[in-house]
Amino acid sequence: MSIPVPYHRLARTDDHRWWRPVAGTLVVAVGGTALGLAVFLAFTVAAAVAGRPDGADDVPSFGPRADLAAAFLGIAALLPAALLAARWVQRRPAGTLSSVTGRLRWRWLLTCLPVAFVTIVVFLGAGLGLAAATGADTGLGDALTGWPSFLASMAVLILVVPPQAAAEEYVMRGWLLQGLGAWFRRPWVPIAVQAVVFAALHGWGTPWGFADLMIFGLVAGWLTVRTGGLEAAVALHVMNNLLSSVLAAAYGDLGLDETAADMPWQLAVVDLPVLLGYAAVIVGLSRRRGLTTRAVPVPVPGAPYIVPAAAGTIR
């Protein structure tokens, strides 16, 4: 009788060899960088042809919104690279990066999104409130930008934030967690390592910002293993980036100067209980809805896992 396989072990197929995660990581890094560079060059060439002036990077630019879109789409380019690495290098269905069902469980994702929305609203509200109470400059007293500028920024954000956030989840909580999971039976080392890498890739801003990114990575990684897929982590990441960017857009400060690594201590302190609360709610919902969290391996070429359909299972 086959033993059900948790999410972090889905790369441990009959075709697994020790070198496949290493080779696949090179494909993700090189392929994603190449695709991201292609996106940047496309924006730059288009701006040059249109006769646009140089931007902050001393290359022709359509402005801060276009620079943000190019940067986010450049990150989003990592997503197809990760899917191709799973399929070509590890010889498993690319959908096993999404979940134990071999695909993204859209109904479960849509269930997680409103929970993530409330979570980030609480985080931003409490964090900014604490910052104001401790005398920090929140910028909320600054003049708001006009509606045309705000709506233009929102249109860009809605288009580029979801693929950017999803790509980071597919690479960190998907590819990296499963790649390490092919070597480690227990999930704790893969969860911890991907959290450190996730924080490091955002750069070093403040110790609080780095610690918060670590905690985010740990919670997102644990939820991914616990729920058998990336949906809960993707929902939280999308809402975090989108709502944070909406605030910046409202004040006409939409740019790339600061990241989560620059987070002040007030927001970091608030974020820990908020993230734990999100995890508790998501786990409770997954249990109530009978979410499938493990896969059963079967010896069928090209389809190493199968999940029996069950009443009440969200896919």
Image (tube, grey):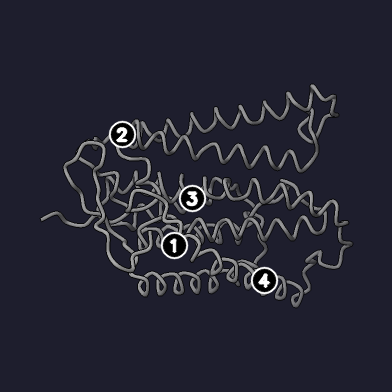
Q: Position of residue 233 (x, y in %)?
A: 48, 58
Residue 75 occupies which quadrant of the picture? top right
Looking at the rendered structure, which numbered label has been put on residue 127? 4
What is the crowding at mark 4: few (fewer than 14 residues within 10 Å), some, or many (at least 20)? many
Q: Nearer the viewer, mark 3 or mark 2?
A: 3
State the CA–CA distance, disc 4 to disc 3.
24 Å
Label disc, if present, on residue 20 of the rendered structure: 2
Q: Earlier in the sequence, mark 1 or mark 3?
A: 1
Q: Earlier in the sequence, mark 2 or mark 1?
A: 2
- Which mark, residue 208? none
- Mark 2: few/some/many CA within 10 Å (<14, 14-19, 20+): many
| Label 4 vs 3, first from the N-terminus | 4
Dot 3 and dot 2 residues touching (CB under 8 Å): no
Three-letter amino acid code at the position of disc 2: Arg
The N terminus, quarter of image: bottom left
Residue assigned mark 1:
108
Q: CA distance from mark 4 to mark 2?
A: 42 Å
The image shows residue 287, relative to residue 215, as above or below, that is below
Task: Find out whether the residues at labels 4 and 2 contact each other: C-beta distance under 8 Å.
Answer: no
Query: Which residue is labeled 3 in the image?
Result: 169
Q: Secondary structure at mark 3?
A: helix
- Mark 2–mark 1 Cα distance, whole angstroms, equals 30 Å
Label whose residue precedes the other's in the sequence (4 or 1): 1
Residue beneath the point at 56% across and 61% down? 212
How much space separates mark 4 and mark 1, taking CA atoms?
28 Å
**Coordinates of residue 252 in the picture (x, y in percent):** 82, 53
Between 9 and 131, the one nearer to me in the picture: 9
Which numbered mark, 4 or 1, is in the foreground of this view? 1
Q: Quick one: SS at disc 4? A: helix
Percent from the top left, x then y, of residue 37?
61, 28
* Disc 2 to disc 1: CB gap under 8 Å: no
> Which residue appears farthest toward the bottom when viewing the image?
133
